[in-house]
Image: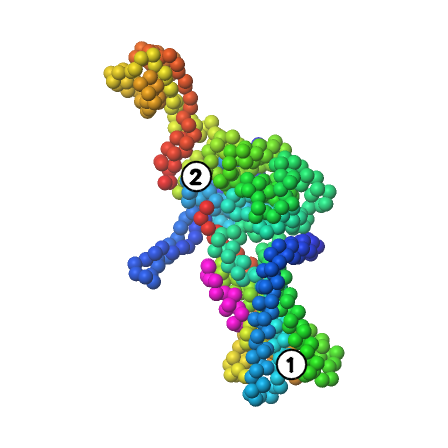
Amino acid sequence: MEPVIEVEGLSKSYVTYRRGKGLLRRERVTVTAVDDVSLTIGAGEICGMLGPNGAGKSTTIKMLCGALLPSAGTVRVLGYEPFRDRRRYVQEIGAVFGQKSQLVWDIAPIDSFAMNKAIYAVPDAQYRETLDELVTLLDVADKIQVPTRVLSLGERMKCEFIMAMLHRPKVVFLDEPTIGLDVIAKAAIRDFVRGMQARGTTFVLTTHDLEDVERLAEHVVIIGGGTKVFDGTLHDLRRSLGETRIVELTLARPAGGADLAGLGAAGLAVVGRRSELEVTIEADLRSLNPAELLATLSQRLEITDISIRELPMERVITEIYATNGR
Amino acid sequence: MRRYLAAYRVCLRIAVRQATTYRASFVLSSLIALAANLAFPLVTVLIYGSGAGFPGWTADEVLLIQAVFTLSTGLSGMVLGAVVWVTTLRVREGTLEVVLLKPLRPLPFIVLTTVQPESAGVGLGGAVLMGWAASRSVHGLTAAGVLAFLGLFVAGLCVMAGVALIMAATSFRWVGNARLPEIADSVHAFGRHPLRVFPGAVQGAVTFVVPVAMVGFYPASALLGREAAGMWPAAAMCVAFLAGGVWLYHRQIRNYQGVGG
């Protein structure tokens, strides 16, 4: 896949002040928000950028958008150096910030769209065609004529997407685009992103909603404490904590203490008991292959049902956050 | 340039739509702005009515200076009135990204999107007052006088823009200073009096350092046929001031840090 975003040794530091002793004193401190981040994102990918609050995700996105000047390192997106070539560069990209609106509050979204048409010099025919298409895809035909301030958050976010896509950007940056949305609005936004990706648009997405990542991103980057702590596929991410599996058992009779202690001795950890007959254990398949696992379990317990699944994403992320940069 | 003009047309329409969304507020704001700007000339009338005044200047001549000042304030307020506080607000709240995402220079974009139609009332009030004061104080108007007035008037707008931009540029480092627009207004205020009422050092400062005397005093003097020393060098300084303001504003964008995400 041809790379469209290439980042090498990207860093951003800024000076701020910490409350000092006494009423009037303050201490000057230099904060490194992003520290030596390198990554490559291919054309047509959806890259999910994850990280705890204050990890440096948004700062990274802002540097990729050309809004912030990096302190060190290089960024090339679509062949441009974002901050230096900003005006030509932003003509080729779009961005949706979940917490910063591009729509004009007191007027109808259609007027904001007209403003972007003029600003991006979108030809009339292309504007009409793109607008009709986006409005239909996002199902907001009856919403774009009423003032932005009366729209629901979900409707407003759909209009933000239209605003960002009217000039047909090749790369789109999404900073927490589903924040605060209900499940239906989230699903609509995700379908829309998927649809646009199918047409070749590259997306970079920061989010705290792991479902966004699971449903959209093949490529995941995790930032913690300003540094990159993971860069790979969703599959790699799940595997990053080893071959641990969650095994849920339903038993024919309650398991005794000795039975469960025996599981521990075999390298299996009991992590939950919903009832006397329902036990959840964790198994590391590197020390016990699936056949051995089933044999070990059936030797010690009378099982009526079993399900084996991968570690939940939340668990993977929590462990990575806990070990890196928290 | 064509893109900027097209954007300006759309943004002007949007500004009018926004203003008419809250009609009562628009009318009230326009009237308050007009009343606030015409209150000062009223004080001049009262001062001269009580027998006092500025030596060497009649009441009508002083009113002409203040009318030119009011007209300049209205015009610059329409175009640049919101630049200082909008920049301050966007830097403090970390929403300048929205501006930097547009394929325009940030300053014209902010100017385009913050047109203040309610300042039109101030400009109109200034124009009416100027017509009235000029009819009573300007005798033997020449084409050269009109041209000089227009040139100096534009120079006055340049210095107002320059001051606004320098103030706005400081907000990138002096984050959240809500008093910046007031400071800008206070600096401009030196332009609405006959220059000679100030001490020599102040006269020099408001002519050549921060040439706000160009906002009212010098253009009105040209209209009155009262050539003043330093008028044209000060006009050149005004243009330099604007260029400096634009340069500083764009330079300071490099210091934009955003806010925590």
Subunit of label 1: B
Q: Is residue A310 magenta?
A: no
The residue at the point 53 percent across, 32 percent down is A216
Find out whether residue B184 is within the magenta segment: yes
Question: Which residue type does callout 2 highlight?
Answer: Gly
Q: Determine whether B244 is above or below A233 in the image.
A: below
Q: Nearer the viewer, residue A312 or B248?
A: A312
Q: CA distance from mark 1 to mark 2?
A: 64 Å
Q: Which percent across, then down, holds residue B130?
A: 66, 76
Report the residue marked by disc 1: B221
- Hey, which quadrant is residue B52 in on the image? bottom right
In the picture, measured across the screen, residue A303 lies left or right of residue B173, that is left
Residue that extends furthest to the right in the rendered view of this protein:
B143
Q: Secondary structure at mark 1?
A: helix
* Mark 2: secondary structure: loop
Q: Which quarter of the rendering shows the C terminus of chain A?
A: top left
| Residue A147 x, y percent position in the rendering | 61, 48
- Tell me: residue B63, above or below residue B92: below
Please name the residue that numbered disc 2 is placed on: A51
Residue B202: give x, y in percent of width and height. 52, 79
- Left or right of A17? Residue A155 is right
Name the kind of residue labelled 1 in the image. Answer: Ser
**Residue in view at x 36 percent, y 17 percent:** A249
**Range of the magenta residues?**
B174-187
In the picture, the disc for residue A42 is none
Q: Residue at x 59, y 64 (%)?
A: B28
Q: Are marks 1 and 2 in contact (CB under 8 Å)?
A: no
Q: Nearer the viewer, residue B50 or A129?
A: B50
